[in-house]
Amino acid sequence: MSFAEKITGLLARPNQQDPIGPEQPWYLKYGSRLLGIVAAFFAILFGLWNVFSILTLSVSCLVAGIIQMVAGFVVMLLEAPCCFVCFEQVNMIADKVDSKPLYFRAGLYIAMAIPPIILCFGLASLFGSGLIMGTGVVYGMMALGKKASREDMAAAATSPTQMAGSQAGGQMQMGGDQHITLMEDPDVWRPT
């Protein structure tokens, strides 16, 4: 058994469909889940550190610590429901969120990470919530999907008047009517 198979076996959930899809590489699928687990652990740990800031009479840091710990538990619940085997509904909640599009999870993680940073700006809240936000960003990048090929991007970037010429050797030929191309550019005709 290779190292990659061991890691995927540890991070795979039983009876899990592949909501991310086969177009994502395995290291991105399981790396995002691993990042979420690590982010949840550090969010809980640094949230507890922020809760102890009540000793310095900082109520906003206390509230930020509680929010950060709750966010850490939610991320842990969604990324590793095996940690909550004593609760019966955890697998149902995790499966329901797994069935949603990836941008839903990305938005949820980013929205949960912002309030502790705003309420108590410090290294503990920045690092703990920043990891959760980083997990959300990774899921957001996965939701965007695979980058298009160079030819597809070049075809999408050309205007219809430029596509009149033939393609020779992978190079786009300019159309014969340059005046139309310049008039389509809003920087050319915008009054200064």
Image (cartoon, helix red, strand yellow):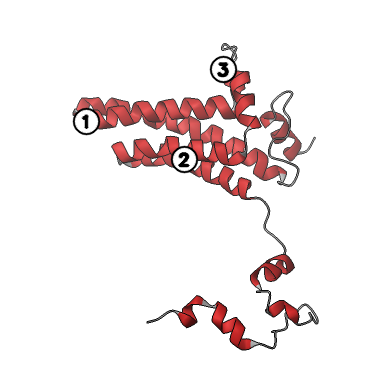
Residues packed near mark 1 inside 10 Å, few (<14), some (14 to 19) or many (20 plus): some
The answer to whether 154 is drawn above or below residue 141 in the figure is below
Residues packed near mark 3 inside 10 Å, few (<14), some (14 to 19) or many (20 plus): some
Type of the residue with mark 2: Ile
* Mark toward the viewer: 1 or 2: 2
* Mark toward the viewer: 3 or 2: 2
Residues packed near mark 2 inside 10 Å, few (<14), some (14 to 19) or many (20 plus): many
State the quadrant of the C terminus.
bottom left
Type of the residue with mark 1: Ser
Q: Residue at x 39, y 30 (%)?
A: 68
The answer to whether 147 is drawn above or below residue 72 in the figure is below
Q: Secondary structure at mark 1?
A: loop
Residue bearing the label numbered 1: 58
Q: CA distance from mark 3 to mark 2?
A: 23 Å
* Residue 92 seen in the current view: yes
Q: Residue at x 80, y 34 (%)?
A: 1
Residue bearing the label numbered 2: 110
Residue bearing the label numbered 3: 84
Q: Position of residue 133 (x, y in %)?
A: 47, 42
